[in-house]
Image (cartoon, rainbow, N blue to C red):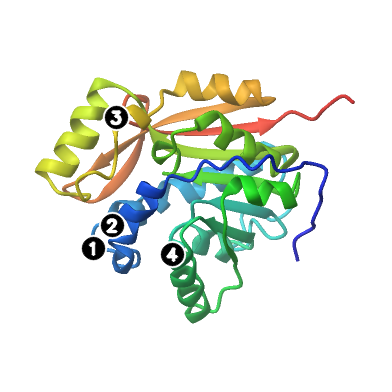
Amino acid sequence: MLKRSFRFHNTGANTVDKKEIDHFQNFLEEWWNEFGSMKALHSMNKLRVPFIRDGLVNSGRIRDKIKTPTALEGVSLLDVGCGGGILSEPLARLGCNVTGLDANPNAIELAKHHSEKQGLKINYAASSVEEHASQYFETYDAVVASEVLEHVTQKNEFVDACIKCLKPNGSIFITTISKTNLAYFLGILVSENVLRLLPRGTHQFEKLIEPSRLQRILEDYDCRTELIHGMCYNFLTNTWHWCPDTSINYALHAVKIKSED
């Protein structure tokens, strides 16, 4: 059960972009096709699941069961923009108490149906993160926003709401696309228009964000960046690798600093 708290009051702000919801509505049936338009997200789990696990280990949240199949047992985690649950499910298998959040109710219904077939207990909710934060202030040990921020226009407000959901000393994990000419060329023009790895219009250059800017936003909301990794995708083998270059895809782990008050 989620612990409700009303210490933070929602101002009515909402960062959900209806155009983005409508775009992803067009290929809901592709969420669980590991060889379709979501295959890069499926293969990304081989990086982002260990990234989240290791980040929680390094921040001291996990101690006793590091090398066990349920290493994240007891960790409360919010997966913001969960879609059909591609990332929520493997995290639940590691023992996490996962809440999957998405503004598209149809994606949430799909996620619920799939997780039930897998015998997984995941709490899915159709909501914006701002609405969720108004009810679940400082509830979670970890918040994940993976491949979501590049679809958000109001980034400060979105990050602020994610941080409000975090307990003090909790971790936020973000994967997204950098705002560089190389990311525009390879991540949008080539990926969407030439290779057709994603439907056209999935990403817009103006919504991308550089790691340095994201880090500053997190600092504004009292979060200390622990790690930034570059991520490289090989479209021929559909595999992801860590790399030092953050000019296209990158992953970031930050910790919410405990208030001295």
Q: Are marks 4 and 1 in contact (CB under 8 Å)?
A: no
Which amino acid does the dot numbered 1 rest on? Answer: Phe
Q: How far apart, in angstroms, are the residues tagged by discs 2 and 4?
A: 17 Å
Amino acid type at mark 3: Phe
- Horizontal side of 102 relative to 138 (left or right) equals left
Give x and y (percent) for residue 214. Answer: 50, 25
Q: Which comes sooner in the sequence, label 3 or label 2?
A: 2
Instruction: Please name the residue that numbered disc 4 is placed on.
Output: 107
Label 4 to label 3: alpha-carbon separation? 25 Å
**The C terminus sits in image quarter:** top right
- Residue 88 sits above or below residue 194 on the image: below
The residue singled out by tag 1 in the image is 35
Cα distance between the residues tagged 4 and 1: 19 Å
Residue at the far right: name it: 261
- Mark 3 and mark 2: span between their CA atoms? 22 Å
Q: Nearer the viewer, mark 3 or mark 1?
A: 3
Residue 173 horizontal/vertical position (percent): 55, 40
Q: Is 209 situated left or right of 62 in this image? A: left
**Contact (CB < 8 A) between labels 1 and 2?**
yes
Circle nearer the N terminus (4, 1): 1
> Counting residues from the N terminus, which is met first, the one under dot 4 or under dot 3?
4
- In the structure shown, which secondary structural element does the residue marked by tag 4 occupy? helix
- Residue found at x 23% / y 24%: 182
Q: Quadrant of the N terminus?
A: bottom right
Residue linked to disc 2: 39
Q: Which residue is mark 3?
A: 205
